[in-house]
């Protein structure tokens, strides 16, 4: 078994570690469920000796997940899942905690993939992904490692889509738990976390007033629902664009205007994409936008925006503010792209509040323990988080909030399992 070099890592500045530790502790105070799991892991060591390679957003909340996994006995190496989402002080602190971390905010594409390679060089047995880049890199470039891989976890909608495509083609290399599919993840992280943090990122980057503006939300999944709700609550006039007729009906009934992106492009002041798909705002849409339109993405990859198409119709670009690139079109109109089209909530803001990530990362930690114990019984498929884990996370969260709920009586349990009772 290879010996993990706990002094390894590639971060911006290790002297930032003290500030990072303080911020990690601040986030921990809002993550009581993960704290309970960490205490349990410290005693039970469910991940003892398991080498985990993680490709995640390097934030204060992720740091607390790493510390919980470390308490459970795991040997860890971490890299960033997005070039702009890293918090450099947190990355430095993680190295001080003996978790080799390879992440620098603003790293170029070459460095990004070199950092993934650094994690793979630790010969992980389990992957922990946020977008599936680690899994696909192992599969395409390091097939010799596959024999030792026992499983993986995936945190995002985008990553689950990619993994299910691999499964459909018969090339998924090992079982993966879709943490994103847990109710205590996507219904809360995606809706409340992305909803709040996306608006926060937009406002930090631009200082734009949401009230009275027309906000176009492209995609009405759980992330889109959250963004639309928060934008509306701040006084924005929300338009939703969709390709799924069921989600379009829901958006309409939730009180939003629904129309194709080609129509919305003429009306919007601020555009946010959250589809997980490719080029949902394209060159022909940029041509229709108002002067000063603000465009950003809160889906995992920046290819939701056709940035090359925008460059083709532009005469140049300036950077009037941090995380704002203002393109001038041939007719003089300007279109602003935030954070290079990458996750605006993590690139221009701090990402999800810790209280929401508490549930997401509790699912992640417990799913890793589940894989360590059950991998021999699993096929090379994408699995949902076991309902027992999902319900336990919800129960622990309610307890931490001081909330009690009812319990079914024996008669109610019998009734719900019976078919004979009727009118």
Image (cartoon, rainbow, N blue to C red):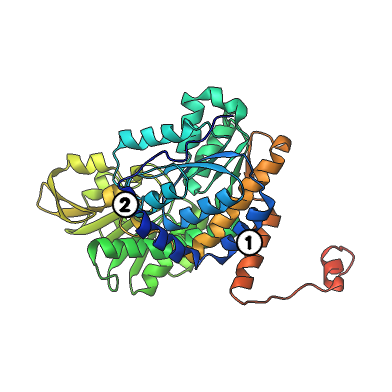
Tell me where residue 277 sits by quadrant: top left
Let me know if residue 355 appears in the view.
Answer: yes
77 or 311: nearer the eye? 77
Q: Secondary structure at mark 2?
A: helix
Horizontal and vertical percent position of residue 63:
47, 53
Residue at 69 percent of width and 75 percent of height: 405
Residue at 9 percent of width and 52 percent of height: 332
Does 278 sit above or below residue 30? above
Number of residues whose C-alpha sits closer than 10 Å to that of mark 1, classed few (under 14), some (14–19) or many (20 or more) = many
Proximity of marks 1 and 2: CB atoms separated by less than 8 Å: no
Horizontal and vertical percent position of residue 249:
49, 61
Q: Quadrant of the N terminus?
A: top right
Residue picked out by circle 2? 15
**From this viewpoint, which residue is outermost toward the right?**
420
Let me know if residue 226 appears in the view.
Answer: no
Residue at 26 percent of width and 43 percent of height: 307
346 or 101: nearer the eye? 101
Residue picked out by circle 1? 393
Residue at 58 percent of width and 57 percent of height: 362
Q: Secondary structure at mark 1?
A: helix
239 or 22: nearer the eye? 22
Disc number at residue 329? none
Tell me where residue 36 sits by quadrant: bottom right
Q: Going from the N terminus, do you reach mark 1 or mark 2 first? A: 2
Horizontal and vertical percent position of residue 37:
62, 58
Number of residues whose C-alpha sits closer than 10 Å to that of mark 2, classed few (under 14), some (14–19) or many (20 or more) = few
Horizontal and vertical percent position of residue 386:
68, 51
Between marks 1 and 2, how big is the CA–CA gap?
36 Å
**From this viewpoint, which residue is outermost toward the top?**
144
């Amino acid at each position: 078994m290879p010996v993990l070099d706990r002094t390894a890592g590639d971060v911006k500045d290790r002297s930032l570690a003290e500030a990072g530790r303080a911020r990690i502790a601040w986030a921990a105070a809002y993550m009581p469920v993960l704290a309970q799991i960490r205490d349990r892991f410290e005693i039970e060591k469910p991940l003892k000796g398991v080498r985990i390679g993680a490709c995640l957003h390097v934030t204060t909340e992720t740091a607390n997940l790493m510390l919980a996994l470390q308490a459970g006995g795991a040997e860890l190496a971490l890299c960033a899942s997005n070039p702009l989402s890293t918090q450099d002080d947190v990355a430095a602190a993680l190295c001080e905690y003996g978790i080799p971390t390879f992440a620098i905010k603003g790293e170029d594409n070459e460095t990004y993939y070199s950092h993934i390679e650094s994690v793979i060089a630790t010969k992980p047995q389990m992957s922990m992904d946020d977008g599936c880049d680690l899994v696909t890199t192992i599969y395409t470039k390091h097939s010799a490692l596959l024999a030792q891989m026992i499983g993986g976890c995936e945190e995002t909608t985008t990553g689950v889509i990619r993994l299910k495509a691999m499964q459909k083609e018969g090339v998924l290399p090992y079982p993966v738990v879709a943490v994103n599919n847990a109710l205590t993840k996507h219904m809360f992280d995606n809706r409340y976390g992305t909803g709040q943090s996306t608006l926060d990122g937009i406002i930090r980057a631009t200082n734009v007033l949401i009230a009275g503006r027309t906000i176009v939300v492209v995609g009405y999944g759980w992330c889109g629902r959250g963004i639309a709700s928060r934008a509306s609550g701040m006084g924005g006039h929300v338009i939703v664009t969709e390709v799924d007729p069921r989600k379009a009906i829901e958006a309409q009934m939730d009180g939003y205007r629904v129309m194709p992106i080609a129509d919305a492009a003429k009306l919007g002041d601020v555009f946010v994409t959250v589809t997980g798909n490719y080029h949902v705002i394209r060159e022909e849409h940029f041509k229709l936008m108002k002067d000063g339109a603000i465009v950003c993405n809160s889906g995992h990859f920046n290819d939701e925006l056709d940035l090359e198409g925008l460059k083709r119709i532009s005469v140049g670009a300036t950077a009037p503010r941090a995380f704002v690139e203002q393109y001038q079109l041939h007719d003089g109109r300007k279109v602003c792209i935030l954070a290079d089209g990458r996750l605006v909530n993590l690139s221009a803001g701090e990402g999800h509040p810790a209280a929401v990530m508490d549930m997401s990362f509790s699912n992640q930690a417990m799913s890793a323990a589940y894989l360590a114990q059950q991998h021999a019984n699993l096929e090379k498929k994408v699995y949902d988080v076991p309902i027992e884990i999902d319900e336990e996370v919800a129960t622990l969260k309610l307890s931490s909030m001081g909330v009690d709920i009812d319990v079914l009586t024996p008669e109610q349990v019998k009734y719900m399992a019976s078919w004979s009772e009727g009118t």
